[in-house]
Amino acid sequence: MTDEQADWDAEAAVDAARQKVQTLLLRETEIGLDQRGRLTIDRGSTRVFLEFFPIPEKKLVYVTLTAPIAFYAPITPELLEHLARNADKWYFGHLAMNPYADDSEYKGQTYVYFTDTLIAEYIDPEELRIRTFAVVDTANALDEEFTQQFGGTRYEDS
């Protein structure tokens, strides 16, 4: 770690980024805060989680926008093909999955979500609004049909 990186306060940078994003989004909608410190916005049957992570070597904070589509979806060849063919078909955001650990009771199942990433220091209010609602609205539009086709549980039903 360089002296310049050591002088950068990652915790303060994350707090400043969270405050900036919260202030910008409060102009548009109600925002919640979950037990993990993530900002949340509910929309239809899902919720978008905004989580903040420091990149000390760049002295930047990135923001992940993540909205659940399905919890506990069985990992099948059909599901994997669907994700491979459709992951990046949107202008903003993409489909992703995070399989549950092999030693968990959910082995063979995955969490499927819609996600996007922004750099907090360069966030424009309009871009933040568009991309945040693109993520949550896309997940809201996909979750019911997705769980009917591939199984799993929507956020609203979990």
Image (cartoon, rainbow, N blue to C red):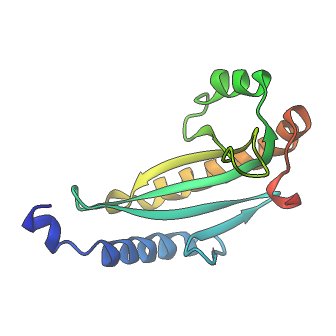
Is residue 132 found left or right of 3 in the rendered image? Answer: right
Residue drawn at x 38%, y 72% is: 14
The location of residue 116, given as percent across then percent down, is: 53, 47
Name the foreground residue: 113 vs 42. Answer: 113
Residue drawn at x 55%, y 35% is: 91
Name the foreground residue: 87 vs 97. Answer: 97
In this view, which residue lies farthest toward the front?
A: 103
Is residue 123 found left or right of 92 in the rendered image? Answer: left
In this view, which residue lies farthest toward the left?
A: 3
- Quadrant where the C terminus lies? bottom right
Name the foreground residue: 139 vs 149. Answer: 149
In this view, which residue lies farthest toward the right?
A: 148
| Picture quadrant of residue 12 | bottom left
Is residue 158 found left or right of 97 in the rendered image? Answer: right
The location of residue 55, given as percent across then percent down, is: 30, 58
The location of residue 154, given as percent across then percent down, is: 83, 52
| Picture quadrant of residue 94 | top right
The location of residue 141, given as percent across then percent down, is: 78, 44
Is residue 80 found left or right of 10 in the rendered image? Answer: right
Name the foreground residue: 111 vs 86. Answer: 111
| Picture quadrant of residue 145 | top right
Residue drawn at x 63%, y 74% is: 31
Residue drawn at x 56%, y 41% is: 93
